[in-house]
Amino acid sequence: MTRLRLLLVLVQLFILPGLAPRVAEAAGSHCAGSRVSVIHTEPAAAEAACAAVRDALAFMAAHGFETDLAFLVEVVEEPRVPHTYGSYDRRGIRIEVLSFAACRRRGGGRLFGLELDPALYRSIIVHEVAHLVARFNGDEAMRDVAGQEYIAFTVQLGTLPEPLLDRILSRYDQPAFARETEITALLHALSPEVFAVKAWRHFTQPGHGAAFYRHLLSRPPVRRPSG
């Protein structure tokens, strides 16, 4: 057993409780140029995960995030968080994402109204990486659901191939968020894909981009009125 594989097994056994039954079936791979490792059952899954990690970290570093982080990505067939494609451990050490085949089964084979292909699948992993990186870059961001999703979706869309991004945007006629108060967890819960498109159109407007990321990382969580 290699030192990397031994390390990943120990991490799963002692740091990530509940994963031990999966270890015997899984393999570990290191993503070159990063401190990220992938737990997977087939090489193709590791390649997709590492490509997504590379894209997410590059995009976020270019927009002012600290991205020199060590974490695990585990590719699974069944999620620990029900009804999701993926999730991230709020301790900041692990991401879980469904395999390509499992994503196609769970989502009816479509995302943003398009058939799920390898590029769209990688974007699902990018989304979870963005959540984890945002959590490390701002304490308040962890508790700000709308801000977290704004970051995750804009990174997800921003790392797509341009022709694919154009196809997605052409399917939605919703405009950009006109004001910050429109960026709500409620809209995300009701229509995540509409939230994503409105966020991207807002993000790409002059004066937003990295500056708005910095604002989201420091703003206090939006609190609902009592009563």
Image: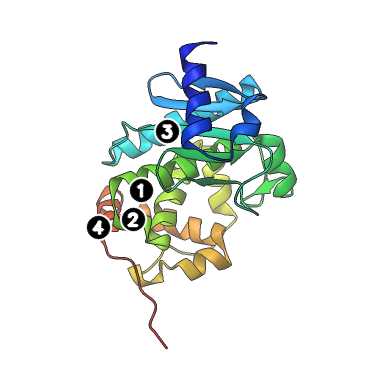
Residue 99 visible in the current orientation: yes
The type of colouring in the image is rainbow
Q: Left or right: where does residue 215 sit relative to residue 194? A: left
Three-letter amino acid code of the residue under disc 3: Phe
x, y percent for residue 211: 24, 52
The numbered mark, 1 or 2, whose residue comes first in the sequence reads 1
Question: What residue did someone put label 1 on?
Answer: 135
Foreground pick, 65 / 18: 18
x, y percent for residue 147: 38, 59
Query: Real-space Cα distance between discs 4 and 3?
Result: 23 Å
- Marks 1 & 2, CB-CB < 8 Å contact: yes
Q: Quadrant of residue 18?
A: top right
Give me the disc on residue 53. none
The numbered mark, 3 or 1, whose residue comes first in the sequence reads 3
Residue sitting at x 42%, y 36%? 56
The numbered mark, 4 or 3, whose residue comes first in the sequence reads 3
The numbered mark, 4 or 1, whose residue comes first in the sequence reads 1
x, y percent for residue 139: 29, 53
Q: Left or right: where does residue 227 sit relative to residue 172? A: left
Residue 137 sits above or below residue 2 on the image: below
Under circle 2, the secondary element is: helix
Give me the disc on residue 218. 4
x, y percent for residue 137: 29, 46
- Marks 3 & 1, CB-CB < 8 Å contact: no
- Marks 4 & 1, CB-CB < 8 Å contact: no
Under circle 1, the secondary element is: helix
Query: Real-space Cα distance between discs 4 and 1?
Result: 11 Å
- Marks 4 & 3, CB-CB < 8 Å contact: no
